[in-house]
Amino acid sequence: QHRHSGNRGGMVWLLWALSVLFSCVCSVDTSKEYDRSNHWVGERPNSQNCTWGVFFQSLDHFSPGLTPGHDAEFSQRYCRYDKFVDDKQKNPPIFFYTGNESPVEVYINNTGLMWELGQKLGALLFFAEHRYEGFSVPKLKGTENCLGYCTTHQALADYASMISWLKSSRPQYENSPVVAFGGSYGGMLSAWLKMKYPTAISGAIAASAPIWGFPLNNPRIDGASAVISRGVSAKGVATDQCRDNLLASWPLIKQAAKSNAGRVMISKALRLCSPLEHDEVDSLLDYLQQPWFTMAEGNYPFASTYITFSVGPGYYPLPPWPMRVACEGLNEDMDIKITGSKSTVNFSVHAPGNFSVKVDWIYSDSSVKSLSAETLESLTKLFSGVEKAVSVWYNVSGNVQCHNIHAPKAKNHSSLLHHRHKRKRISHKHAYETNTCRNDKYRGSWDPICCNENLNLANTIAQGLGNDMFWPPSISSREKANLESVLGPRGHFGPGCDFASEGLFGVPKYSDNWSQWMTTSYGPNAAVSVASNIVFSNGLLDPWSSAGVFVDFDDPAIVHNVTADGSVVSVIIDLGAHHLDLMFSDPNDPPSAVEARKIEEEHILRWIS
């Protein structure tokens, strides 16, 4: 039933390729000793080197008879690179990237591990684009419940179908071993592909895959924020002084903003675009704390546009070790001290000029109502350091002259809760008068997936609970700082996401904050112990490691056996950000990243032998 594109698809993609200046590479060398040297355009291989194609994919793999009308298929784009494969080689390995929530070029251009090992091991490279991303969006307008087909289960069936077609496309690949690669959500898909379709692939490299983040797996609700804080501490090769200065700055800003003189000082020190008003302090704190998640994800030892392009302002590189760069103005002892219990969020912050702020959970106060010249000078220095820190993200382009605290936030790929709050609640009076979609402009898979399958990664829910550099706590009381209080009782269903206002339909009317179906389908934590041939990797500077497989922050070992036979392992990269091991190798990589890639190569060699 599945068809590879012929002239129809070739013409479409040729025109598209020319429009964005893509090109293909010359023919292979057929000498006796097959030449796997660089055949790519540019310094590094990238999407310009792809042979592009489309695969006519079933819109609905599970109930195709119910799929409306003539739109039972859609064109799914892929990149194929075969210049590492000798035409005479029988059953060469296939490296298959399970595309995730961006156009596939993002992963082609950054997944250096596939290119480097593919060249070394003579593999065919295949990068599949996720449905509803890039040029792989099904027909929406005129289709009933058009978003209902955007799920992880449909995506996995897409990849299993593509692999089956790929192996049958040429006799040379009929019995080729297939290794899946993926990072972040793509890593989840790679692992789940091996667990759900164990015969489709021989093994999976699942990097930074937060498959233990579902609520029933009981992740720490402030896990991500605790890891972020590691990146601005000595354990992240920054300084503990930076971490403590940041923690102290938030209640000091809150208290100083109660006076006109304090607000004037804050506005200047933080280079705000407009004078701070007394009712804008919470918005200011949110603005100052928001970029740390994405900086932590992109805390690589080399300059990189991966995170800024995916969820930020565009094709602007973060500097090497951006979290350390952010700390450069905060590493100094500014004579600002914290006393009391940071772990219970019951502490005091003391600044020069006898200025102190008492903090008790979400509350703060000071007996000193006016700021002395000495205090103003000290706080100006501290807040200027905070401004330089957040500018690493906000001014990555170098074009930002001041900070607009009401600017739109960066994308958040965290949880169902975020997407439900971002979208208005469904109006049942109007939303379901029709289920035929009227919008053909929508692009993106992550929002529909979170809403269709209640994909809720609970490790990102909270911050400021006493385990990180943030304040105030995002939960109103200590007694409510637990999953049950945040999510509500298990079995309770809340309102679903509203796409109807955009002319789109197909998502459920109700949502389950506990992600019960996802846990049922993919299994609890213990499910990985009965799987085989998966390498899970996590970096201890990556916020998503708090939902990764077998991450023990106090265990110095790089490799941990997940299964008794050692076929499923967890690899820990102590100074690794978001799937660093999948990136192109770099002279500045930490030793643990180099070792992680060696371990992954060893497992791959076993799988393909």
Image (cartoon, rainbow, N blue to C red):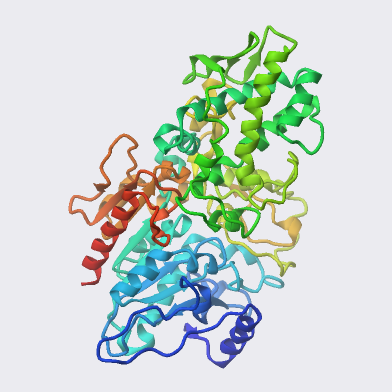
Q: Say which of 576 and 140 sits in front.
A: 576
Q: How many marks?
A: 0
> Residue farthest to the left?
565
**Residue 532 sits in which quadrant?**
bottom left
Q: Nearer the viewer, residue 414 or 512?
A: 414
Q: Is residue 215 left or right of residue 594?
A: right
Q: Position of residue 519 (x, y in %)?
A: 42, 48
Q: Nearer the viewer, residue 28 or 216?
A: 28
Residue 35, placed above or below residue 344: below
Q: Is residue 412 above or below residue 196?
A: above
| Residue 512 can be seen in this image | no
Regarding residue 546, the answer to whether it shows in the image is yes
Whole-percent x, y for residue 412 in the image: 59, 48
Q: Residue placed at 21% from the left, 66% from the top? A: 606
Q: Quadrant of residue 19?
A: bottom right
The C terminus - image quarter: bottom left
> In the image, is 526 to the left or to the right of 506?
left
- 489 or 241, which lies in front? 241
Q: Position of residue 455 (x, y in %)?
A: 52, 50
Q: What residue lies at 49% left-to-right and 77% top-to-bottom?
A: 79
Tell me residue 523's x, y (percent).
37, 50
